[in-house]
Image (tube, helix red, strand yellow):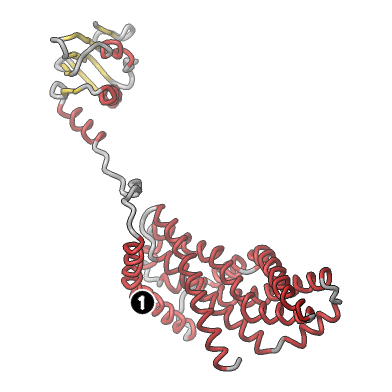
Amino acid sequence: MTFTHPHNSDERKWQLDIHHNGNDLLVVSCSGRWCLDQDLPSIETIQVEMDNALGRISFNTTQLSAWDTGFLAFLQSLLSLCAQRGITIDQDGLPKGVRHLLAMATAVPEQKAAKKRRKKQSLFFQVGSATIDFFRGAPEMLHFLGEITVSFGRLISGRARFRWSDLWWEIEEVGPRALIIVSVISLLVGLILAYLGADQLRLVGAQIFIADLVAIGMVREIGALMTGIIIAGRTGAAFAAQLGTMQVNEEIDAFKTLGLSPIDFLVLPRMLALMMMVPLLTLYASFVGMLAGLLVSATIFNISMFEYYNETLRALELKHFLVGLSKGSVYGAIVAYAGCLRGMQCGRSAESVGEAATSAVVTGILLITIAASLMTIIFYQLGI
């Protein structure tokens, strides 16, 4: 069976000849000009011939005058169709350049990121792997902490180089724009704390002490803790994603090439912004939590607003506010440290950016929990 371009002149036309040579061999002969400016045949042209019982296909291109990617596209479609039907292809009859390009097109390396199916490991293996990874990463975490400490030393001495506009932008991003989510969470936590305390205090007729429980709990512990967790999920992940994307785009390498410290220029403004704004957000969260306690006391337990206000003033002392503010500052520094650390450790792929953001949240919440426990024990031992 022979197919010929019906419109081109003899010197520019292509010709496709298909014939059987033996029981299971189909010979495809291509001659003339096979280029993109021609109306080349589609793979359906020889599909009918391939439907017949055969096992091999060979080529004859001795009369081929010119070819380009149009010819390659035709052959690639033919190769794919043969692979689906289990037909063997003999490429010896193709030009050497065509064989080389086809080999390059079909030689796709394995994508490691796409290979996700792994053998399920035991719990002991997973715990052991996590422990080994932690101890391997500990020196790098300490090194990064040292770099931040040195950067703060340069800031105090006036030698740190960063743009103050970046600092004000980070302050706006981590402070005012986080008020809504902090308000909602603090209100709900205050309601839960008030109901939880009232359920026990009602047994002894001491509902008025709901004010003490909510005020001290929110100001000393829960306000700072909930704010830190919210900021870890909101801002810590954002820091890791931002720095991770810069790592992928080699922007951090560009800072080093220009002689600029990435710690001063990228990490220090974020660290300062969170250390300044998280204590203020902690005070705001504590105030919202106390309003929630007031709402529960006035509407459910018939405690007047004046009584609740006086009891709150009697329960709160300056040391409670100082404890809450100190914890807020520490939590802010932890979130910034975890987010920037994971962002700077990010690899060079989009998958690595996602892993860095996830790791920043997990690391931040874990470190916040450890710091909260240690600071609570220390303050208790000091009688504060």
Residue at horizontal 35 percent and vertical 66 percent from the top: 127
The structure residue drawn at horizontal position 26% and vertical position 26%, both measured from the top left corner, is 83
- Measuring from the top left, give residue 276's x and y in whole percent: 59, 77
- Check disc 1: other Cα within 10 Å, few if <14, some if 14-19, many if 20+: few
**Which of the pair 298/11 is nearer the observer?**
298
Residue 80 vs 369, above or below: the answer is above
Quarter-of-image position of residue 220: bottom right
What residue is shown with label 1?
Answer: 143
Q: Residue furthest front?
A: 203
Amino acid bearing label 1: His
* Residue at 75% over, 77% down: 203
Q: Nearer the viewer, residue 98 or 364?
A: 364
Q: Quadrant of the N terminus?
A: top left
Task: Work out whether 298 lies above or below 106.
Answer: below
Horizontal side of residue 56 vs 105, given as left or right: left
The x and y percentages for residue 334 are 50, 74
Res 264 → quadrant: bottom left
Quarter of the image for residue 137 reads: bottom left
- Across and down, in percent, residue 139 comes to 33, 75
In-front residue for pair 101/191: 191
Q: Quadrant of the C terminus?
A: bottom right
Can residue 282 be seen in this snapshot? yes
